[in-house]
Image (cartoon, grey):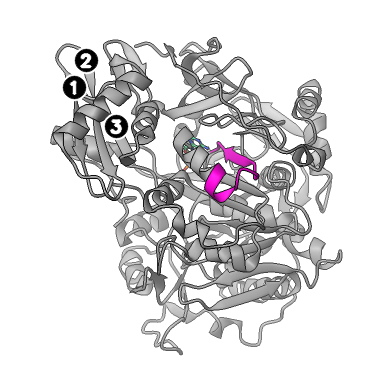
Amino acid sequence: MAEDFEVKLEKKAYIPAPHYLANSALGNYKEAYNKFTSDPDGFWDEKARELKWMRPWEKVREWNHPYARWFTSAKLNITENCLDRHVNNGRRNKLAIIWRGEDGREEVLTYRQLYRSVMRFANALKSLGVQKGDRICFYMPFVPEHVVAILACARIGAIHSIVYAGFGAEALHSRIRDANAKIVITADVGKRRGKTIPLKSIVDDAVRNAPSVEKVIVLCREKCPLELYSELEVDFYGIQEGMSDECPAEEMDAEDPLFILYTSGTTGSAKGIVHACGGYMVGTHYTCKYIFDIKENDVYWCSADPGWITGHSYIVYGPLSVGATVVITETTPDYPDYGVWWSIIEEFGVSIFYTAPTAIRMFMRVGEEWPNKYDLSSLRIIGSVGEPLNPEAFEWYYRVIGKNRCPILDTWWQTETGMHMITTPLGMPMKPGFAGVPIPGVFADVVDKDGNPVPAGQGGLLVIKGPWPSMMRTVYNNDERYRKYWTQIKDYYTVGDLAVKDDDGYIMILGRSDDIIIVAGHNLGTAEVESALVEHEAVAEAAVIGVPDDIKGQAVKAFVTLVQGYEPSQKLVSELTYHVRMSIGPIAMPNAIEFMDKLPKTRSGKIMRRLLKAKEMGIDPGDISTLEE
Ligand code: PRX
């Protein structure tokens, strides 16, 4: 199998206004990157010193492949950086959280209020017998209490394992069991697109046969007070009655686990990715300050959910560690209409907005009249994460949302990496389709299967060469799975993505390497073909899989959804096939194109090509617990 293959690269670039660079915390990228490479430990030492520690480190890192220890023997508590530091340094009355519910209700918490709420809930957890190292599973809607509870766990050293509240009972059950969770925190209901989702009854199913669970904490949102039926159940506010709102931060070793987050492997059971207190804190703080460039007056909004790593790193820990005002919301982008997100930007004056390509493509499909109804002039920076931001989507996002003015930070990273790894730092020319360059602090490259760098224009495998502070430390209960990441290609960290570099060292992510399609000996990234299809005006979204072919080994099959106003037809099939031929080459031409109303997606918005493939081949799709309803 050929790991390297030619990729046709566009040369287009957008130059941001000079003030972005002039005012950026990172400054000139090349200088910052050189400073890092000349003394990597010194670089991270300096970044770590910007934070509050209870005891300093002996060594910045100890690297014993594939195990890293960062900030050895240092002691800290991440909540001291997210809360105490701000309360004691002039941000006491600054808004930490602005929440908007689906019904339009709003709540705000200043840093002081958040601090007090966290400490009170931390004391309530302690009163239930929770101790440092205990696992606490979350199955919560996105309300302010969710953030409070996360920080309360961190305050006392309990390890949170947040399960996105769109997963079913079985997925929740297996995660509770794998982590041996002592407590489950939930709410009676969640709200989604006008519907009420009975979270508590899903938890009822999930905690059956989960003997580790001692208490289920239930937040009441409807018909309060709650009727709690079993000895297991306690009320979220009930357990806080009479509790003190002073709770000293538990002293955590830099290497103590902060949380477990399950990520769905493309195959097999979910992996419990474990992150450690010290390195994770440094990585998320560093990227919020120097990559997102969050400033004192920014109003920051990341549209993810805390159930994903994006929510952990870039809603909760990172933004709060820099003292930002963070907008959070339970709303979906299409309910009650397609204007709701843009109205949030207008009303709260959001200046940094971070979302996913799947949302951008949905908005493209429904038309720019929706965002155009709102004043988006407060925006300063717009970001993207989760999937390749194809050039079509880049152009639309840049023009319609960023008004040809806001730089786009297309950030490449993973649950496992904890923080941004590749992007186009502020001030650098932005190239549609390219995520960008390794950020200072990260050694990334595109290599062949033996680990040799491939030349510009040749596709290959993305790797990270050497450790970084916010790297995962292990897979919970399965260290073997952890070691695999570091032993497949030389001693590098294998990302599992295909990528290509251009002459300037910009990296384009082509899709997962497990989504690779080899047609007549040529490797094609699914994202590459999908991007070509989406360029066509009739196509809203596309998913591409490889299907067996007697002659070519594999052939391309495409599934597409159409922009409103277009109808499936044989003529359109020919047109799209021709379009792919013209943009990538004959090798990428789909053998078949199927029109769909909707593509199967995970709850985090990733297209589930595996499911399309299983259906196509008439085989068992395996674990589909991550599938959207
Ligand atoms: O394939 C890459 C894609 O998402 C994978 C990581 O998924 P997850 O752990 O769920 O984390 C998503 C949020 C960080 C990567 O291996 N991915 C993530 N960001 C990008 C991306 N692909 C292309 N461009 C990105 N900006």
- Can you tell which mark lies on residue 342? none
Rendered location of residue 452, percent (x, y): 54, 10
Q: For the residues marked 2 and 3, what is the alpha-carbon distance in whole angstroms?
A: 16 Å
Q: In terms of secondary structure, where does tag 1 sit?
A: strand
Q: In terms of secondary structure, where does tag 2 sit?
A: strand
* The stretch drawn in magenta includes residue 526: no
Magenta stretch: give its range.
398-413
Q: Which residue is more in the foreground, 218 or 189?
A: 189
Q: For the residues marked 3 and 1, what is the alpha-carbon distance in whole angstroms?
A: 13 Å
Position above or below: 109 against 517: below
Q: For the residues marked 2 and 1, what is the alpha-carbon distance in whole angstroms?
A: 6 Å
Question: Toward which corner of the image does residue 348 lie, by quadrant?
Answer: bottom right
Q: Which residue is more in the foreground, 434 or 368?
A: 368
Give the amino acid type for the residue marked by disc 1 in the picture: Pro
Rendered location of residue 229, percent (x, y): 36, 84
Q: Is residue 17 left or right of residue 454?
A: right
Give the amino acid type for the residue marked by disc 3 in the picture: Val
Q: How many marks?
A: 3
* The stretch drawn in magenta includes residue 411: yes
Q: Which residue is mark 3?
A: 544
Q: Quadrant of the N terminus?
A: top left
* Residue extending farthest right: 89
Rendered location of residue 293, percent (x, y): 73, 46
Q: Which residue is mark 1?
A: 548
Which residue is found at the position 42% from the left and 48% from the top?
364
Decide if ligand 1 comes within 8 Å of the CB at mark 2.
no
Which-is-in-front pick, marks 3 and 1?
A: 3
Instruction: Tell me whether the residue at label 2 lies in contact with that at label 3, contact meaning CB atoms closer than 8 angstroms.
Output: no
Q: Which residue is mark 2?
A: 553
